[in-house]
Amino acid sequence: MANPGAPKLNCARYRPSLYAELIDGKAIAETIRQELKAEVSELQSKFGKAPGLAVVLVGERKDSQTYVRNKKKACDEVGIVSYGTDLPETATEEEVLAVVAGYNADPNVHGILVQLPLPKHIDEQRILDAISIEKDVDGFHPLNIGALAMRGREPLFVPCTPKGCIELLKRTGVKMSGKKAAVVGRSNIVGMPAALLLQREDATVTIIHSRTPDAEQICAEADIIIAACGRAEMVRGDWVKEGAAVIDVGINAVDVS
């Protein structure tokens, strides 16, 4: 079951003269929510309980608090039971691990999300590795990522934002098999898993990062571009060829003055 709390994506299919035909991401998201609502209802009828999702938030970052609120709202909309633990910025690594262990042991919790980033004094990887692989709905556990990277293997869960990108492409009829794809950014959260998912759809994938010398040329030849580098306006309109599908994962503040 897809994570209903995935960030919203800005998407476009570019045409000559920089005219863009927008993909209606909100309409697609609403359709998916209705599908999930039906699936959750079926699960509840079959097993006598609804799926449970736990979110662990450490600190008081405004953006993280917003993401967590949106995840809880999405759970309510589809019938998933939401659990949450908010810890202060000063929480120790052991305190966070104890919360994760509690949710690992709770039979009513079927998925665990630890909101990233964590405070700098906490070892992020240690926390993520502590999540039971059966509840790793973010898909960040090394065993899930490893299975995603291997042909013939299926991960239990896939990172939600890259999965959302692929779902948008599929639901708008964008062909991926045999196409050239460029992924701008190589983060563990979006860029790298997005590239792996595109490969699974038989696209030929190039990952662009800060040391890539010919990013513009690679994008100009791509049929599909996923921009996930955390830098506003990195991909320019003249980098995109006619008919290419572009998904912008970034959420950046831009000075328009």
Image (cartoon, rainbow, N blue to C red):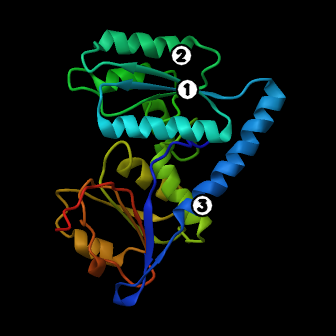
Q: Secondary structure at mark 2?
A: helix
* Mark 2 or mark 3, whichever is nearer to me: 3
Q: Residue 104, relative to residue 236: is it above or below?
A: above
Q: Is residue 145 above or below residue 50?
A: below
Q: From the top left corner, tell me how far across and down residue 74 is, in percent.
A: 57, 41
Residue at mark 2:
104
Q: Residue at x 36, y 82 (%)?
A: 241
Residue 222, image quadrant: bottom left
Q: Are marks 1 and 2 in contact (CB under 8 Å)?
A: yes
Q: Are marks 1 and 3 in contact (CB under 8 Å)?
A: no
Q: What residue is drawn where x is 26% and y is 74%?
A: 236
Q: Which mark is residue 28?
A: 3
Q: Residue at label 1?
A: 135
Query: Three-letter amino acid code at disc 1?
Result: Lys
Query: In the figure, is residue 127 to the left or right of 143?
Result: left
Q: Does 97 sit above or below residue 51?
A: above
**In the rendered structure, which amino acid carries the disc numbered 2?**
Asn
Residue count near mark 3 (Cα–Cα under 10 Å), binned few <14, some 14–19, many ≥20: some
**Residue drawn where x is 36% and y is 21% of the image:** 127
